[in-house]
Amino acid sequence: MKDTTPLLEIRDVSMRFEFVEALKSVNLTIGHQEVVALVGDNGAGKSTLVKIIAGLYQPSTGSLRVRGQETRISDIRNANALGIASVFQDNEFCENLSVAANLFLGKELRTNYGIRDENSMHVRARAVLNTLSSSIQVSRPISSLSMGQRRTVAIAKTLLNNPDLILLDEPTDSLSIIQTAEVLEYIRRLRAEGRSVVMVCHDLPDVFAIADRIAVLRQGWIIAVHNASETSYEQILAEIAGIPNVDDHEDTDLERPLPHGDCNPRRGLIKRRTEQSGLPA
Ligand SMILES: Nc1ncnc2c1ncn2[C@@H]1O[C@H](COP(=O)(O)OP(=O)(O)O)[C@@H](O)[C@H]1O
Ligand SMILES: [Mg+2]
């Protein structure tokens, strides 16, 4: 029977860094076996949201539910134990070590005698790279890999824990067209295996190529979540930029003052924008 409990529910999550409110009352649900893209301009709060799910930050307010259970994700290790793995923009490797050694850095396999089990690590490293259909040789030094291959190793590393949810922050950033196509293919493969992916991506063609749903962040708010098949490049771009669409222009509610604590971010943004620009709402 299909599990209808969401994999992850983000409820009313806010995040404050001193004077910056990076996230404002964010609600988002991640289902099983889906790819959700987080899009938005620089500083919109995308990485902060991913870091909260990854266990790197604790939200200032709000809660997370994993498979229906309210959960505090205390750190990356705890996230891994919950089946959540992450790859961040600046994945760090030990340049002098091999692909296999980097994959198992900090969690080396050992024999029953407590000795590093190089053989098992090579076999297992080969197996995870195979699941991505990657032919990278696991004995190669990581320093000899291209940017795209390093990204592949970073994604493969998440698979060691057999996660249900993989978080990718800008997975196609600074990759060539071919390498980008490869990474998108890996993401498809992860989904085909039954996993879910939340990816931050500012490249809208990549987003439309892969995402099932698209969440648009602006100034810390999630202002829209769309099924990718039911929206358009233009609509997403307009939402990222905070440009009201035709329907919003006709919304006469905008003429009324916003009640204190109005939590409809879209309306608030549109209102502020029209005030600033002097355009009629
Ligand atoms: N560790 C931090 N300390 C202080 N401010 C931060 C920190 N991380 C992010 N911010 C601020 O939070 C806002 C959202 O940042 P971020 O989540 O990185 O945005 P995005 O990934 O969408 O570009 C920005 O104003 C940023 O400067
Ligand atoms: Mg970011």
Image: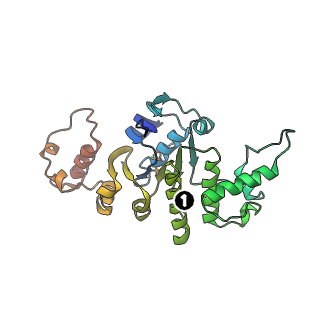
Q: Nearer the viewer, residue 184 or 256?
A: 184
User: In x, y percent, where is residue 181?
Assistant: 51, 67
Q: Considering the numbered disc 1 on the image, is that residue within a helix, a strand or a loop? A: helix
Return the residue nearer the eye: 210 or 215: 210
Amino acid type indicated by mark 1: Tyr
Please, which residue is most extreme toward the front here?
A: 1
Q: Is residue 19 visible?
A: no
Q: Residue placed at 56% from the left, 54% from the top? A: 89
State which quadrant residue 63 falls in: top left
Left or right of residue 72: residue 218 = left
Q: Is 132 located above or below residue 109 in the figure? A: below
Res. 128 in view: yes
Q: Residue at x 72, y 58 (%)?
A: 99
The foreground one among 257 and 126 is 126
Q: How many marks?
A: 1
Q: Residues within 10 Å of mark 1 (few under 14, many from 20)?
A: some
Q: Assign the N terminus to one quadrant of the image.
A: top left
Say which residue label 1 marks.
186
